[in-house]
Amino acid sequence: MASKGGLAIGDLAARTGLAVSAIRHYETVGLIAPLRNAGGHRRYGRADIRRLSFVMIAQRLGFPLARIAEIMAGLPEGRPPTREDWAGISGAFRRDIDARIAALASLRDKLDGCIGCGCLSLDRCALYNPADRAGQRGPGPRYLMGDAPAG
């Protein structure tokens, strides 16, 4: 149960649906920073519920924990985030999402060239061999022979 000193880790787990071990992990990567009471027990603020909920959503959207921590580093410590704080974070995520959409759209648009190719006609592969860069390294299916795609 929540006390004047904040939420115990079990209470935070119950409120977020996360395992205690997950909350501790998120603490070690810097997503939340609990206070310690006189007995040394972790105590979490109500803002930590929002932070952890946001982390869960961002992970479901495919963002790696390191990126989430990087973006959330701009959130204030010791007080709940404001709408302006969240707007800044959402802007960073929006840029990431827009870049992912552009990459997926490019993949979609180039995918037709792969159908029936079998990676043997790499001179025409817009995905792995634009402008036949692999042809400069010799004949044959270069990537199937273990060569890394030319960057």
Image (cartoon, helix red, strand yellow):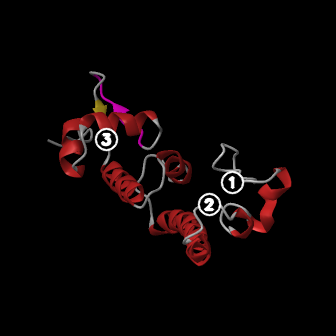
Mark 1 residue element: loop
State the separation of the CA atoms marked 3 and 2.
Answer: 54 Å
Residue 43 shows in this picture: no
Q: In the image, is residue 86 above or below residue 110?
A: above
Magenta stretch: dominant SS?
loop
Work out whether 31 lies above or below 108. Answer: above
Q: Which residues are magenta?
A: 32-38
Q: Residue at x 56, y 49 (%)?
A: 70
Name the residue beneath numbered marker 3.
44
| In this rendering, position of residue 130 left or right of residue 56 | right
Dot 1 or dot 2: first in sequence order is 2
Q: Quadrant of the N terminus?
A: top left
Marks 1,2: beta carbons within 8 A: yes
Disc sitting over residue 141 in the figure: 1
Is residue 34 in the magenta section? yes
| Occupied quadrant, residue 130 | bottom right
Quadrant in which the C terminus appears: bottom right
Q: Is residue 126 visible?
A: yes
Of mark 3 and mark 1, the one earlier in the sequence is 3
Q: Position of residue 73 (x, y in %)?
A: 54, 48
